[in-house]
Amino acid sequence: MKIIGTGRAHPAKVVTNAMLEEFLDTSNKWIVERTGISERKLITNERLEELAVKASLLAIEDAGLKPKDIDYIICSNVVNEYITPSLSCIVQGAIGAKCACVDVNVACAGFVYALDMADDRIKCGKAKNILVLAAEEPTRMVDWSDRATCVLFGDGAGAVVVTEGEGYVCSRLSAVSMTDCLHYMRCLEPTPYITKEEFSAPMYMNGRQVFKTAVMLSSRDIKALLADEGLAPEDIKYYVLHQANMRIIEAVANHMELDMSYFPHNVEYCGNTSSASVALLLDELHRAGKLQRGDKLILSAFGAGFTTGTCLIEWTK
């Protein structure tokens, strides 16, 4: 499997740290020191599916294809306005594709998991051209009076088109059940027979535990994957990590004993866009001309669960 097209879409609204100071007990200095984030882009009057469609069409165009050429759609999404139908099904109709589609929810690791699923489907001959999409609005899951969480997130959508060929080298996926440190709950509709206590609550995150676990597991997976392939850390052009927090990215770089030039980032002006972050950054690198044929890239993400996904790709576009 190889990537032949990329695309991304952001909301129009830019929210700076100074704007958050207007209603939160926080400051630009406090946010930047702890997260590295200066601004983020938030959905206002857009709908998430509109961003998803835009990113998808850009990726399909970049691949030199038409929507009718897409055989399958995999969409990573945690939450949107619809529980059902799936976001992938909404996108399928909006772009004019005529293929089967499925959503996956592996939290912020979802895009890497979706790539791995696409690779499996292509290898077994069930599809040729697959649209892999990640579209997220995590800003709708947080308490906007909680400065510890709401300052972190932004919204967006990123997409790639993959097809038959060599480029997806290997992957490593893992999951450890640690639901207490990071979760989001919302009530279902009531029935006359429900007797258990139920409640809805904004996203809960134990920041210290998430930081420690993310750095430990991401570094472990990257090192194991490199060892399996007989590669040195310096053999990788870029480590495209989940853009959760600049401190986490810096800590992984430290564990890998590499300088930050190997770790591109956009979290400072996009915020944490959940599973969309890796796809967004990959498109940004591609369209800026920073990726050359033959470059080896590590894509790595972690998310609630606790889930991790890491893959090695060779850029072939």
Image: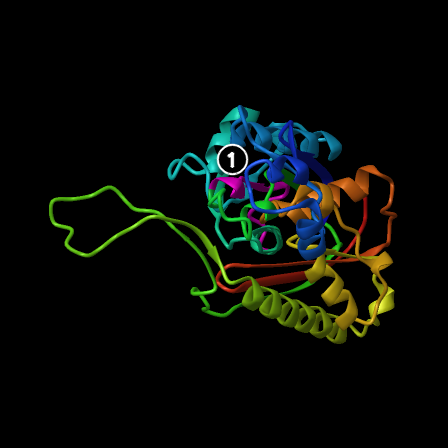
Q: Indicate the quadrant where residue 23 lies.
A: top right
Q: Which residue is drawn at 71% across and 29% down?
A: 61
Q: Is residue 299 magenta?
A: no
Residue 89: x and y in percent read 47, 34
Q: Nearer the viewer, residue 28 or 7?
A: 28
Residue located farthest toward the left when viewing the structure as drawn: 192
Q: Which residue is drawn at 84% across and 67% down?
A: 258
Which residue is tagged 1? 99
Number of callouts: 1
- Residue segment shown in magenta: 124-140
Mark 1 residue type:
Cys
For residue 246, say whether it is visible.
Answer: yes
Badge 1 crowding class, 10 Å Cα cut-off, few under 14, some 14 to 19, many 20 or more, is some
Residue 197: x and y in percent read 22, 55
Q: Residue at x 73, y 66 (%)?
A: 252
In the image, taking residue 86 as reference, residue 188 lies left or right, namely: left
Q: Which residue is drawn at 59% across and 30% down?
A: 51
In this rendering, the answer to whether 263 lies above or below 51 is: below
In this rendering, the answer to whether 313 lies above or below 79 is: below
Q: Nearer the viewer, residue 154 or 296?
A: 154
Residue 218: x and y in percent read 65, 67
For residue 162, say whether it is visible.
Answer: no
In the image, taking residue 17 as reference, residue 287 lies left or right, namely: right
